Image (tube, rainbow, N blue to C red):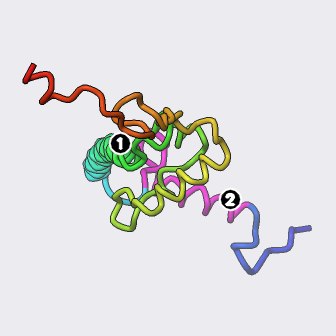
Amino acid sequence: MTAPTNPNPLEDPAVSTEMTDASQTDTAAPDGTNPPEGPEEGQQSAANREAANYRTKLRAAEAERDTLAGTAATYQRRDAEALVGDRLLSPADLWVAGVELKDLLADDGTADKAKVDAAVIKVLADHPHWAPKRPGVPRNMGQGRRGGEVDGGTSWSSVLKG
């Protein structure tokens, strides 16, 4: 008996194995590896170098941006502390009380006097002991004429006449 023949050679397992092996050998490199798809090797490495160059420039720009942002924040803090003046023992008490710099800035990035004033009032309400102690002014400084009648004592003219 003879084996039945398959009219479709692609369904025949012996034939389909031979076809797939042949198609793989046509595209495979001599060393047995498949070549990379897309641009050639030289073009790909040039693109990688260019991308690496852009990434390096990006990191440098980000570092410079962070440095400048830190410097600007320092100046903004100084401006806000200058607006506090002597209403607190230390103007840096604003930051100790938890006030955020962004809450004290105007739309243009400068310290807003009204916002600083409101923050100082809130800090003093929460921490009244942070207000500087002002010396009381005595009512009688011990100078000048005190109340009462002027007696007819010695005058400059009587001293000079003599």
Front-most of residues 133 and 11 = 133
| Picture quarter with the N terminus | bottom right
Mark 1 residue type: Arg
Task: Report the predominant secondary structure element of the magenta stretch.
Answer: helix
- Characterize the local packing of mark 2: few (<14), some (14-19) or many (20 or more) Cα atoms within 10 angstroms: few
Examine the structure image and report whether residue 119 is included in the region drawn in magenta: no
Q: Say the numbered circle drawn on residue 140.
A: none
- Characterize the local packing of mark 1: few (<14), some (14-19) or many (20 or more) Cα atoms within 10 angstroms: some
Residue 98 image position (x, y, % from top left): 60, 44
The answer to whether residue 14 is above or below residue 10 is above
The answer to whether residue 6 is above or below residue 117 is below
Residue receiving disc 1? 78
Examine the structure image and report whether residue 30 is included in the region drawn in magenta: yes
Span of residues in magenta: 14-36
Instruction: Please report whichever mark, 1 or 2, sits nearer to the chain's N-terminal start.
Output: 2
Residue 101 image position (x, y, % from top left): 47, 50
Q: Say the numbered circle drawn on residue 17.
A: 2
Whether residues under marks 1 and 2 lie with C-beta atoms below 8 angstroms apart, the answer is no
Front-most of residues 155 and 45 = 155
Q: Secondary structure at mark 2?
A: helix
Image mark count? 2
